[in-house]
Image: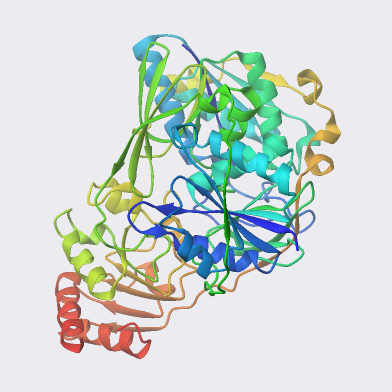
Amino acid sequence: MNIVVLVKQVPDSGAERTLSASDNTVERGSASNVINEMDEYAIEEALKIKEAHGGEVTVLTVGPGGATDSIRKALSMGPDKAVHVQDDALHGSCAVATSKVLAAALRTLNADLILSGAESTDGRVQVVPHMLAELLGVAALTGARKLTVDGSQLTVERQTDEGYEVVTASTPAIVSVWDTINEPRYPSFKGIMAAKKKPVQALSLGDLGIASDEVGFAGATSQVLEFTKRPARTGGAKVVDEGNGGEQLVAYLATEKFV
Amino acid sequence: MAEVLVVVEASQATGVKKVTLEMLTIARGLGSPSAVVFGDASALTDKLAEFGAEKIYVASGEDVEGYLVAPKATVVAELVKQVQPAAVLLGSTQEGKEIAGRLAIKLDNGLLTDAVEVAADGTATQVVFAGSTIVKSKVTKGLPIVTIRPNSVTPAPAAATPAVEQLTVAVSAADKLTKVVERVAEQKGSRPELTEAGIVVSGGRGVGNADNFKLVEELADLLGGAVGASRAAVDSGYYPHQFQVGQTGKTVSPQLYLALGISGAIQHRAGMQTSKTIVAVNKDAEAPIFELADFGVVGDLFKIVPQAAEEIRKRK
């Protein structure tokens, strides 16, 4: 099975994140950038499927030059190769434009199965898998907590607010996964060394037949007008339980009219 | 006045979800609200009318309900072409966002997700980066397609007498690629939906095991709240993932968030720090959760929580 995993580099969600004061985009220059955590689960799922059914795993990333670090990290887990779409004109792209670029790159890769994280920790927008399905005319099985592959038949347990749905489709398809689906492996030393030699194909917008004014700020379908930092919360009263902590808690809830 | 399409979020068990009423409330500031219902609308119309729906469009049948998301996007896209609405509002839920994404591609249109407010000119306010940053954005191509985060505005009733229109649905083969084979409801009981609840009581690693989560549930039930869990608790198997609050789970913004045995890692705070009031119980006086708690109790939750439950019963 030919599997492509979408990997996004994002600012570390465990650190301070901000927008750039000059153009209101996500500040990536000064941030500590990492693989979007949920994508590691997609990589793991791809590797498990390859191990069980054979095939090839390709990492696909759209992002600036610095995203190479995340691509090598992804490859160190085990995928065979990577494609990196990189072009200065991409800076400032909206989700619609980004999905068009991903779709163009995916058309060159002829994937049976496209895997991605259910959301990225920076935008948390969750729309790209269905946008790609719409653009490519393939099935989307999103929000997976379990994926079963039987030949060309895919079955997914899709997590919902009420419980879950069982959804099925045939390949080619895109599946997005939550972090409940598996436990991603740690890259081995051998994997880290091997990743340095794995092929990373660079593609520009020109290679994909996309004009630079279809993406970036020029092609954006939405615009951030302004942003402000929310004032940080400050802690209030803190009491140490001396036998009546529960009563004190309820007394506080009562003053706030919750009981 | 131009119509504003509100894609209705409802559940079989509880009917119209609160976020729908919030969307209708926001929609009234943008135009004339028209609700779009997928499936049987008969149990929903009264509520939609009470909150100002001037029109109700209904799309039902196996072609819409038997497949994942895509047919719904087709229905909304056709409706957009037909009525030329001023905006389309959807819930900031998994499905709401997915419909919005497909709609944006179909119409080659911009979209904004996780809005907490939409101004009359379509400018949306979003809270991003774990609640640390407030952003104002606008769709610059096409009409505003905006998903609304639950618990953003107070729903205000405004009675209307909606006309109900059954839509004829023509979905394509591409819309039917992903079949829904089964819908399974898991435990939640009569508790309110996590993202919509006014009160959320959450348990963390400090709760210790799955069985002890009964304590969290008991307090939630006494307060009429929903139950949440930290990632540590979910990863340890104490509680199901759909109740996880934080970076890789749900974002909640209730009036009261009660954190029991949760240290308050940044990934957890990401999902709850826009809550109005935060109360924490933790045995570690240095736990970061206390930095944002309006009221904190340092101590053993296994003593404090049962005592609090008893005290609430006494006061009732």
* Nearest the eye: B134 or A221: A221
Q: Is residue B102 above or below residue B248?
A: above
* Location of residue A200 by image quarter: top right
* Location of residue A181 by image quarter: top left
* Nearest the eye: A135 or A16: A135
Taking the image as shown, residue A241 lies to the left or right of residue A24, namely left
Q: Residue at x 32, y 55 (%)?
A: B13
* Nearest the eye: B100 or A201: B100
x, y percent for residue B172:
59, 25
Taking the image as shown, residue A211 lies to the left or right of residue B112, namely right
Q: Is residue B204 above or below residue A77?
A: below
x, y percent for residue B23:
57, 62
Location of the C terminus of chain B by quadrant is: bottom left
Q: Is residue A33 visible?
A: no
Q: Residue at x 15, y 84 (%)?
A: A243
Taking the image as shown, residue B203 lies to the left or right of residue A21, namely left
- Figure label count: 0
Q: Residue at x 15, y 75 (%)?
A: B306
* Location of residue A120 by image quarter: top right
Location of the N terminus of chain B by quadrant is: bottom right
x, y percent for residue A75:
51, 23
Q: Is residue A138 above or below residue B141?
A: above
Taking the image as shown, residue A196 lies to the left or right of residue B189, namely right
Q: What colouring style does the render use? A: rainbow
* Nearest the eye: B36 or A87: B36
x, y percent for residue B280:
33, 73
Q: Is residue B30 visible?
A: yes
